[in-house]
Image (cartoon, rainbow, N blue to C red):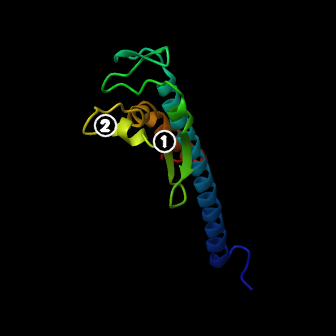
Amino acid sequence: MPSPLSPENEVRELADKLERLANLLETRVLDALEQGAQILAQQVRANLREEGRSGRVYRTRGVEHQASAPGEAPASRTGELSDSIAVEPGATEGELHVVADTAYAAALEFGTHQTEPRPFLQPAFAETREGIKARVRNAARKSVPSSRV
Protein backbone atom coordinates (compact mmCIF):
# COMPACT_ATOMS: atom_id res chain seq x y z
CA MET A 1 0.00 0.00 0.00
CA PRO A 2 1.42 3.41 -0.97
CA SER A 3 2.37 5.80 1.82
CA PRO A 4 0.30 8.98 2.30
CA LEU A 5 3.06 11.07 0.68
CA SER A 6 3.84 8.70 -2.16
CA PRO A 7 4.05 10.01 -5.74
CA GLU A 8 1.00 7.88 -6.65
CA ASN A 9 -1.11 9.58 -3.95
CA GLU A 10 0.14 13.04 -4.93
CA VAL A 11 -0.73 12.40 -8.59
CA ARG A 12 -4.16 11.03 -7.66
CA GLU A 13 -4.84 14.00 -5.40
CA LEU A 14 -3.76 16.44 -8.12
CA ALA A 15 -5.95 14.67 -10.69
CA ASP A 16 -8.95 14.89 -8.34
CA LYS A 17 -8.36 18.61 -7.77
CA LEU A 18 -8.06 19.23 -11.50
CA GLU A 19 -11.28 17.34 -12.17
CA ARG A 20 -13.14 19.38 -9.53
CA LEU A 21 -11.71 22.58 -10.97
CA ALA A 22 -12.74 21.60 -14.51
CA ASN A 23 -16.29 20.80 -13.34
CA LEU A 24 -16.57 24.11 -11.49
CA LEU A 25 -15.22 26.03 -14.48
CA GLU A 26 -17.65 24.32 -16.86
CA THR A 27 -20.65 24.96 -14.60
CA ARG A 28 -19.84 28.63 -14.07
CA VAL A 29 -19.07 29.32 -17.72
CA LEU A 30 -22.23 27.56 -18.91
CA ASP A 31 -24.26 29.57 -16.39
CA ALA A 32 -22.64 32.79 -17.64
CA LEU A 33 -23.44 31.86 -21.24
CA GLU A 34 -27.08 31.20 -20.33
CA GLN A 35 -27.26 34.57 -18.54
CA GLY A 36 -25.66 36.23 -21.55
CA ALA A 37 -28.20 34.67 -23.92
CA GLN A 38 -31.03 35.90 -21.69
CA ILE A 39 -29.51 39.41 -21.64
CA LEU A 40 -29.29 39.35 -25.44
CA ALA A 41 -32.92 38.24 -25.73
CA GLN A 42 -33.99 41.04 -23.37
CA GLN A 43 -32.07 43.59 -25.46
CA VAL A 44 -33.71 42.35 -28.68
CA ARG A 45 -37.15 42.73 -27.07
CA ALA A 46 -36.30 46.19 -25.74
CA ASN A 47 -35.07 47.35 -29.15
CA LEU A 48 -38.25 46.08 -30.80
CA ARG A 49 -40.46 47.89 -28.27
CA GLU A 50 -38.60 51.20 -28.59
CA GLU A 51 -40.57 54.14 -29.93
CA GLY A 52 -39.41 56.68 -32.48
CA ARG A 53 -39.20 55.03 -35.88
CA SER A 54 -38.78 57.26 -38.92
CA GLY A 55 -40.58 55.32 -41.65
CA ARG A 56 -43.84 56.24 -43.31
CA VAL A 57 -47.01 56.80 -41.33
CA TYR A 58 -50.17 54.95 -42.37
CA ARG A 59 -53.57 53.97 -40.98
CA THR A 60 -54.72 50.38 -40.48
CA ARG A 61 -58.23 49.72 -39.19
CA GLY A 62 -58.47 53.34 -38.13
CA VAL A 63 -55.22 53.25 -36.11
CA GLU A 64 -52.22 55.34 -37.10
CA HIS A 65 -48.89 53.50 -37.24
CA GLN A 66 -45.38 54.67 -38.03
CA ALA A 67 -43.33 52.06 -39.81
CA SER A 68 -39.58 51.63 -39.50
CA ALA A 69 -37.24 52.96 -42.14
CA PRO A 70 -34.68 50.65 -43.77
CA GLY A 71 -31.88 49.91 -41.31
CA GLU A 72 -34.02 50.57 -38.23
CA ALA A 73 -35.39 47.82 -36.01
CA PRO A 74 -38.91 46.91 -37.08
CA ALA A 75 -41.67 49.07 -35.64
CA SER A 76 -44.00 47.06 -33.44
CA ARG A 77 -47.68 47.01 -34.27
CA THR A 78 -48.89 43.83 -32.56
CA GLY A 79 -45.93 42.81 -30.38
CA GLU A 80 -45.86 39.37 -32.01
CA LEU A 81 -42.20 39.58 -33.07
CA SER A 82 -41.06 40.81 -29.65
CA ASP A 83 -43.12 38.14 -27.90
CA SER A 84 -41.55 35.44 -30.06
CA ILE A 85 -37.96 36.15 -28.94
CA ALA A 86 -36.65 33.17 -26.98
CA VAL A 87 -33.46 31.39 -25.95
CA GLU A 88 -33.25 27.80 -27.18
CA PRO A 89 -30.58 25.12 -26.67
CA GLY A 90 -28.35 24.26 -29.59
CA ALA A 91 -27.11 20.89 -30.76
CA THR A 92 -24.19 20.75 -28.32
CA GLU A 93 -23.79 21.53 -24.63
CA GLY A 94 -23.29 25.23 -24.08
CA GLU A 95 -24.67 26.15 -27.50
CA LEU A 96 -27.58 28.55 -27.20
CA HIS A 97 -29.62 30.36 -29.83
CA VAL A 98 -31.62 33.55 -29.45
CA VAL A 99 -34.46 33.07 -31.91
CA ALA A 100 -37.38 35.01 -33.30
CA ASP A 101 -40.15 32.52 -33.96
CA THR A 102 -42.36 34.22 -36.53
CA ALA A 103 -42.79 33.55 -40.22
CA TYR A 104 -41.54 37.03 -41.12
CA ALA A 105 -38.56 37.45 -38.75
CA ALA A 106 -35.88 36.52 -41.31
CA ALA A 107 -37.43 38.80 -43.95
CA LEU A 108 -37.22 41.71 -41.50
CA GLU A 109 -33.68 40.93 -40.30
CA PHE A 110 -32.16 40.37 -43.75
CA GLY A 111 -34.61 42.02 -46.14
CA THR A 112 -36.11 40.52 -49.27
CA HIS A 113 -36.03 41.34 -52.97
CA GLN A 114 -38.85 43.81 -52.22
CA THR A 115 -37.84 45.31 -48.86
CA GLU A 116 -34.68 46.58 -47.24
CA PRO A 117 -33.51 44.93 -43.98
CA ARG A 118 -34.90 46.05 -40.63
CA PRO A 119 -32.30 44.28 -38.46
CA PHE A 120 -33.11 43.59 -34.84
CA LEU A 121 -30.96 40.60 -33.83
CA GLN A 122 -27.53 41.74 -35.05
CA PRO A 123 -27.75 45.24 -33.53
CA ALA A 124 -28.78 43.80 -30.16
CA PHE A 125 -25.87 41.37 -30.33
CA ALA A 126 -23.48 44.24 -31.12
CA GLU A 127 -24.86 46.14 -28.09
CA THR A 128 -24.47 43.22 -25.66
CA ARG A 129 -21.45 41.34 -27.04
CA GLU A 130 -18.74 42.89 -24.86
CA GLY A 131 -20.85 42.55 -21.70
CA ILE A 132 -21.50 38.88 -22.44
CA LYS A 133 -17.80 38.25 -23.08
CA ALA A 134 -16.93 39.98 -19.80
CA ARG A 135 -19.53 37.89 -17.94
CA VAL A 136 -17.99 34.65 -19.27
CA ARG A 137 -14.44 35.85 -18.61
CA ASN A 138 -15.37 36.78 -15.02
CA ALA A 139 -17.01 33.39 -14.47
CA ALA A 140 -13.82 31.70 -15.64
CA ARG A 141 -11.65 33.92 -13.44
CA LYS A 142 -13.75 33.17 -10.36
CA SER A 143 -13.43 29.45 -11.04
CA VAL A 144 -9.66 29.33 -11.32
CA PRO A 145 -7.71 30.48 -8.26
CA SER A 146 -5.00 33.05 -9.02
CA SER A 147 -5.68 32.76 -12.73
CA ARG A 148 -5.02 35.09 -15.60
CA VAL A 149 -7.87 34.05 -17.89
Residue visible at 51% across and 56% down?
90
Residue beneath label 1, please? 102
Q: Which amino acid does the dot numbered 1 rest on?
A: Thr
Which mark is on residue 1? none
Whether residue 54 is visible: no
Q: Secondary structure at mark 1?
A: loop
Which mark is on residue 111? 2
- On screen, residue 121 above or below 21: above
Q: Is residue 24 left or right of residue 123?
A: right
Q: Which amino acid does the dot numbered 2 rest on?
A: Gly
Residue visible at 43% across and 30% down?
127
Residue visible at 57% across and 39% down?
38
In the picture as drawn, the residue positioned furthest to the bottom comes out as 1
Q: Is residue 116 left or right of residue 120?
A: left
Residue nearer the viewer, 147 or 78: 78
Q: Give coordinates of residue 9: x percent, y percent.
A: 67, 75
